[in-house]
Image (cartoon, rainbow, N blue to C red):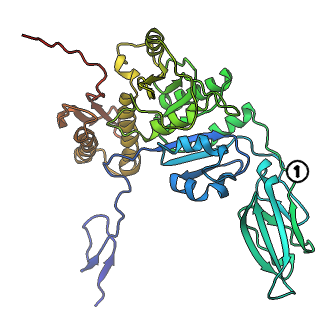
């Protein structure tokens, strides 16, 4: 006899048989997302052009030469070394792409940029087979690729050059690639980066720029993303009084020759992105590689705090973060003094981002807006906040602090939620009575 079978939507089948649904578990869960994701636009001598590319801290240490043209311990990489002291992932964008690729008779550099001029091709007869050639690609003094071929048509492009397959191979002790140039950085370069990074998720954005116009461009982007699109992150820039919780303004100037005075943005961006939601980088020791101006009087330090300036100062010979604050100076009834503290912003950003991912992935268009559906959403929202309470990021939380109700329309859900943020100890007031 014929049996029923297949999948089911409701339990209304007539024929006997096995009706089995295979479903994927929802990809979003009521869990805290990891921090440590940063993004920066960079001026580079080598690398991908016109696109955002991901680099992990492991990639940077192992493949820095392939990605950026220099080993991770090279002088040119000092800024990124500082960044990766705190960040675990970087969404990078090359601002000065679009230049000229270096080239010679045998090959063209994979990317434009002046680093391509440090490439050369060495060709020698193969010792074991005189009908073949050993072709080496050399960057500086390092051999980065070696192939043995009969003709140029047999050569395969590598991480540094694309070979000219119609070339005639002949012995050479080293033919340099020439003519490589970096592209020009303009306001359009920065806007192109912001347009492309808009669809990514990250904790902190950093921009090593010194002109007010460009700094304000980044501050405006951060404000729009936070306030209009609900995408929560903080932006680190140099010496900007933005008066906004989403913008961190670094006060100290870098004095190293050949580096932008705004280069401390690298370290701060990494440290802020990697700081856990229940922690602060207040009093954190600067362990980066730059020399920075940090000689301030007590009155100057007090003025810096009042002005919302993220400042480093000297403590017994060490250089440390004075206070983990953002540029917000103007408070209101709805946003008080606590919003000046970056630990507060980390907590509310964690909740905002995790709640949004949870709802958009697990509930939007999937779960019915009925009592059981709203209870499920309430349960997941409570779980996120309970995890924050468990790690000491918030305190005095109870499940009653989250309320999920039917909205004004059949598809709307209204959530109200209260939290009490925990901040790191900041001041000690002690009275000692001696008898």
Q: Residue at image x 55%, y 17%?
A: 241
- Residue at the limit of the structure toward the left, as seen here: 435
Dot 1 lies on which element? loop
Across and down, in percent, residue 403 comes to: 23, 34
Relative to 32, 61 lies left or right: right
Who is closer to the viewer here, 182 or 134?
A: 134
Q: How crowded is mark 1: few (under 14 residues within 10 Å), some or many (20 or more)?
A: some
Q: Is residue 198 visible?
A: no
Across and down, in percent, residue 408 comes to: 33, 31
Q: Is 95 drawn above or below residue 149 in the view shown?
A: above
Relative to 349, 263 lies left or right: right
Q: Residue at image x 76%, y 68%?
A: 157
Q: Is residue 154 visible?
A: yes
Across and down, in percent, residue 61 comes to: 56, 55
For mark 1, what is the residue? 179
Relative to 420, 228 lies left or right: right
Who is closer to the viewer here, 340 or 170?
A: 170
Look at the image and tell me in which quarter the C terminus lies: top left
């Amino acid at each position: 006899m014929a049996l029923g079978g297949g999948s089911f939507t409701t339990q209304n089948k007539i024929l006997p048989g096995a009706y089995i649904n295979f479903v994927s578990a929802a990809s979003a869960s009521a869990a805290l997302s990891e921090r440590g994701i940063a993004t920066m636009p960079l001026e580079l001598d080598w690398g991908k052009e016109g696109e955002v590319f991901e680099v992990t801290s492991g990639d940077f240490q192992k493949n820095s030469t392939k990605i950026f043209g220099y080993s991770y311990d090279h002088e040119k990489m000092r800024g990124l070394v500082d960044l990766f002291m705190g960040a675990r992932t970087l969404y990078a964008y090359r601002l000065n792409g679009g230049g000229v690729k270096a080239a010679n008779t045998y090959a063209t550099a994979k990317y434009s940029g002046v680093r391509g001029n440090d490439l050369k091709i060495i060709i020698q007869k193969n010792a074991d087979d005189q009908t073949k050639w050993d072709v080496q690609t050399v960057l500086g003094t390092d051999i980065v690729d070696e192939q043995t071929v009969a003709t140029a048509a047999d050569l395969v492009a590598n991480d540094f050059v694309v070979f000219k397959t119609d070339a005639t191979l002949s012995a050479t002790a080293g033919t340099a690639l020439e003519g490589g140039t970096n592209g020009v950085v303009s306001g359009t370069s920065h806007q192109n980066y912001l347009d492309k990074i808009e669809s990514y998720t990250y904790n902190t954005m950093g921009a090593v720029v010194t002109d007010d116009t460009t700094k304000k461009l980044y501050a405006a982007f951060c404000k729009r993303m936070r306030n209009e699109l609900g995408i929560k992150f903080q932006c680190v820039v140099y010496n900007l009084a933005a008066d906004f919780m989403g913008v961190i303004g670094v006060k100290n100037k870098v004095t190293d020759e050949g580096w932008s005075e705004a280069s401390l943005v690298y370290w701060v961006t990494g440290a802020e992105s990697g700081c856990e939601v229940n922690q602060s980088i207040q009093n954190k020791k600067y362990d980066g590689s730059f020399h920075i101006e940090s000689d301030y009087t007590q009155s100057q330090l007090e003025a810096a705090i009042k002005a919302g300036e993220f400042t480093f100062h000297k403590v017994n010979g060490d250089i440390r973060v004075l206070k983990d604050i953002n540029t917000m100076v103007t408070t209101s009834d709805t946003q008080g003094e606590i919003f000046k503290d970056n630990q507060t912003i980390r907590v509310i950003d964690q909740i905002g981002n995790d709640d949004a991912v949870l709802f958009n992935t697990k509930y939007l268009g999937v779960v019915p807006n009925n009592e059981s559906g709203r209870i499920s959403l309430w349960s997941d929202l409570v779980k996120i906040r309970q995890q924050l309470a468990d790690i000491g990021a918030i305190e005095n939380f109870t499940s009653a602090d989250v309320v999920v109700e039917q909205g004004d329309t059949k598809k709307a859900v209204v959530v109200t939620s209260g939290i009490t943020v925990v901040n790191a100890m900041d001041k000690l007031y002690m009275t000692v009575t001696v008898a």
